[in-house]
Image: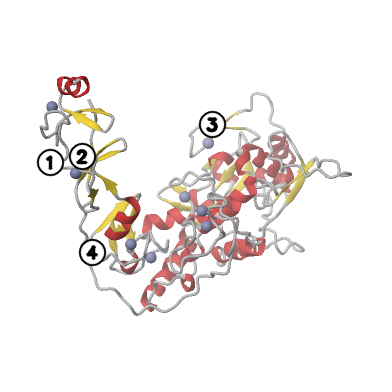
Amino acid sequence: MGDVQHEQGDSPYESIAKIDTSKKEVVLGHEIGSGAQCLKCGDACTGLELHFWRRICKICKCSPEDHAVVVQEQETVRKVGRLFDSTKYKKYAIERMTIEHTEMMAKPEEVQTANASPSKHVTFEWIPQGATENMAKRYMEMIPIENQPVEGTEGAQHRAKQMQRQLPDHDQQPELCQQLNTEEAERMLDFVKDYKEKAVGIGQVQPVVPDANPQLQMQNLSLEESAAPAPGHPGAPDVVPGTEHQPGKASVGVGGDAQALQAAETPKAGADETKWKCCRCAKGMTGGDVAVFAERAGNDKCWHPGCFRCRTCNELLVDLIYFYKDEDIFCGRHYADLLKPRCAACDELIFSEKYTLAEELSWHIDHFCCWNCDTVLGGRRYVARESHPYCLPCYDKLFAKYCGTCNEKIEADSKRLNHENNFWHADAVCFKCSSCAVSLVGRSFLPKDRNIFCSVQCKRKYYNQ
Ligand SMILES: [Zn+2]
Ligand SMILES: [Zn+2]
Ligand SMILES: [Zn+2]
Ligand SMILES: [Zn+2]
Ligand SMILES: [Zn+2]
Ligand SMILES: [Zn+2]
Ligand SMILES: [Zn+2]
Ligand SMILES: [Zn+2]
């Protein structure tokens, strides 16, 4: 017996407020990345061209980060710097590292030239802040190869994409938002100030020391107790003076006792079991391995490098930048999504009191528009397809279906039934047994070719005549 899927094209929508036409113009930075090739669509997209208010490509409708936009390292430093401008990370810098390639590391495709021998080295475009070369190397070996930011590999591209995806500039800078009036811009500034104070942090990579007291391992990494940066390293993270109980910093060479250093660098047999458990996978940590610590979460919490992921999107947190809420870690985008609605059309957070809720998504009132022609749909009927709303004429033009019985077009706002690739008007006239003409609406049926039957008898009769 065939299954029938009821598809309802009829979802009337009520406008909930008048459209505010007093918006000021905002520059979206349309020239940035303009013409970049789409990594998803290839030749089907002639190059990134930003829609005038949606944050997507006009040509292929993919997001800008799906295009091969080259983001200058300085841009990333500025972005992250803004995020941490009132914290101890204000001297944020990106450190690179070139080391000998190991089997557990991604390697760029060799460019074969006549007299150049293939390189045995790889360059990481980013390493954890404050990590020694050895810690950074172990950290990289513990995250999936496709996430390793090795220059010239997909991992580096993935990092650039996640930098845009997880930390949208328009979640930080009201001046990049097109929808804010003065009052809403102030609300947004408060929101930004609040998450800087309460939520955002950078994970610290530290070796797990089997016998260390969890309460003490991280004590000197708190925001309040941070010391001045080491002289001569303006871009370096704060270096914390060592104490007896600070084995993690021993390998940095700024304190820590010799015993702890030994514990961190060369775990003895039997020292594998520690009291440390990963907050994401709940498995135990192995002594001597590196783990990620997040001071907002407390000194007694840590994660495997490959487990330091956003709870919502499950992506590794780009450059270890986390937002802490409800005893868990999130990327910037999904932290904001816990607190504010986000417009499904322009991707901005919504700070106005009135907005549209439709298809389980939020929309600025004047951004609830046809995905194809941008006609505002407030107060009009529309059809949703893959979470995108369409006006009825566009829906018909793009997706019109024809009835298998009467061969007439099934209007977007009329009910239809479908089985596999066949469609019918959902009424007794069209959805009926091909043999005896009894209505099959709401009943089980037997499909064959483009026909449907009420019973095996009718099916036999039809084909054996
Ligand atoms: Zn595309
Ligand atoms: Zn495109
Ligand atoms: Zn884990
Ligand atoms: Zn996320
Ligand atoms: Zn919007
Ligand atoms: Zn339309
Ligand atoms: Zn029909
Ligand atoms: Zn029949």
Residue hosting label 1:
429
For label 3, the crowd category at 10 Å Cα-Cα, with few meaning under 14, some 14 to 19 and many 20 or more, is some
- Identified by mark 4, the residue type is Arg
Label 1 lies in ligand 7 vicinity (Cβ under 8 Å) = yes
Image coordinates of residue 172 in percent, x first then y, are 49, 66
- Identified by mark 2, the residue type is Thr
For label 4, the crowd category at 10 Å Cα-Cα, with few meaning under 14, some 14 to 19 and many 20 or more, is some
Q: Is mark 2 in CB contact (under 8 Å) with mark 1?
A: yes
Label 4 lies in ligand 6 vicinity (Cβ under 8 Å) = no
Q: Is residue 290 something that shows in the picture?
A: no
Q: Which of marks 4 and 3 is nearer the N terminus?
A: 3
Q: Earlier in the sequence, mark 4 or mark 2?
A: 4
Q: Which of 61 and 321 is in front in this view?
A: 61
In the image, which is nearer the foreground, mark 1 or mark 4?
1
Q: Is mark 4 in CB contact (under 8 Å) with mark 2?
A: no
In the image, which is nearer the foreground, mark 3 or mark 2?
2
Q: Earlier in the sequence, mark 2 or mark 1?
A: 2
Image coordinates of residue 161 in percent, x first then y, are 56, 53
Q: Which of marks 1 and 4 is nearer the N terminus?
A: 4
| Rendering quadrant holding ligand 6 | bottom left
Residue hosting label 4:
380
How is the structure coloured here?
Answer: secondary structure
Residue hosting label 2:
405
Alpha-carbon distance for marks 2 and 1?
9 Å
Residue hosting label 3:
284
